[in-house]
Amino acid sequence: MQMIVTTSHKPERRQVVEALELARRLKVRYVSRRHLVRRKGETVVVVESKGISALKDDKRLFFHPSLAVIRRSNIKSGERDYLIESLSLNGDESVLDCTLGLGSEAILIAHFLTKGKVVGLEKSKIVQIVVEDGIKRVDNVPKWVAEAVKRIEILNADYKEYVRSTKEKFDCVYVDPMFEHPSCNSPAMDNLRPFVDNSTVDVSDLEFMKKIARKRVVVKARWNDSIFERYEFNRVMGSPKSGISYGVIEV
Ligand SMILES: C[S@@+](CC[C@H](N)C(=O)[O-])C[C@H]1O[C@@H](n2cnc3c(N)ncnc32)[C@H](O)[C@@H]1O
């Protein structure tokens, strides 16, 4: 992936220092914003005054906890949340979120783990950087979000390798790969798509997830995803309206 680092327009000195340090860490070029020439397909990492974002063609990736906030408020007003139901949490568990993405579901899960923790894995370096930076900096967010993010640890890792090599065990393992048949009504996912890893979850991955899970493994997919033909789950739950399903494997 071709990548460069820059700042927003008229940066403060600290943004330039941060951008230079980030470019060094990523082993890519730093270009001052004044001299930036955008190229098709190139990822531009932008150190803004309040966080890091990434641009690619017409898409902009940035962290915002709004999806978690909406879901929590739906739960508060009595709506079912099939992710939270399928995980059946007591509040003191450890959860491995194999596919962190924008971190929305990790935040929601961490909210229900007042005495537990979430470890979130993300294979795409740029997604991991943007989301980890955003999660560390959260301000002007509801108190519950600020509390929940303290219980999330983020690693830049491929879950396929991680679940095969880790010595750690987790109460629940959750995986939400990019959908085989994406729905077109999620602007957040549309902006994430150019930066992500699109691999599907294999039955052999699920076997290794079962080995490191004490209670259950949960897989999110659309109802017509091939994983539901390739694997027989103990139960599948979800809303027929959204077409999103959660396959549960009890260990
Ligand atoms: C559908 S998104 C996850 C969305 C997430 N549940 C949320 O709440 O924002 C899938 C994410 O998993 C990542 N991913 C895909 N394959 C992966 C792998 N093998 N290891 C780690 N992350 C992976 C993608 O890069 C992408 O960011």
Image (cartoon, rainbow, N blue to C red):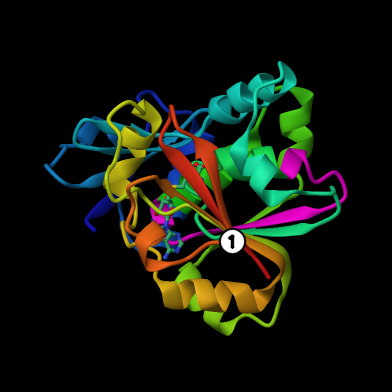
First to last magenta residue range? 110-126
**Does residue 140 appear in this view?**
no
Residue 48, image x and y in percent? 45, 31
Disc tally is 1
- Along the line of sight, the residue nearer the viewer: 128 or 172: 172
Residue 222, image x and y in percent? 39, 44
Report whether 235 appears left or right of 200: right
Circle 1 Cα neighbour tier, 10 Å, few/some/many (<14 / 14–19 / ≥20): few
Q: Residue furthest left?
A: 40
Residue drawn at x 39%, y 31% as measured from the top left:
188
Q: Is residue 79 above or below residue 16?
A: above
Residue 140: quarter of image = top right
Quadrant assignment for the N terminus:
bottom left
Residue drawn at x 34%, y 48% as measured from the top left:
179
Q: Is residue 133 above or below residue 227?
A: above
Label 1: state its secondary structure: loop
User: On the image, numbered disc 1 is attached to which residue?
Assistant: 234
Q: Is residue 80 above or below residue 2?
A: above
- Along the line of sight, the residue nearer the viewer: 241 or 205: 241
Report whether 137 appears left or right of 52: right
Residue drawn at x 77%, y 29% as measured from the top left:
144
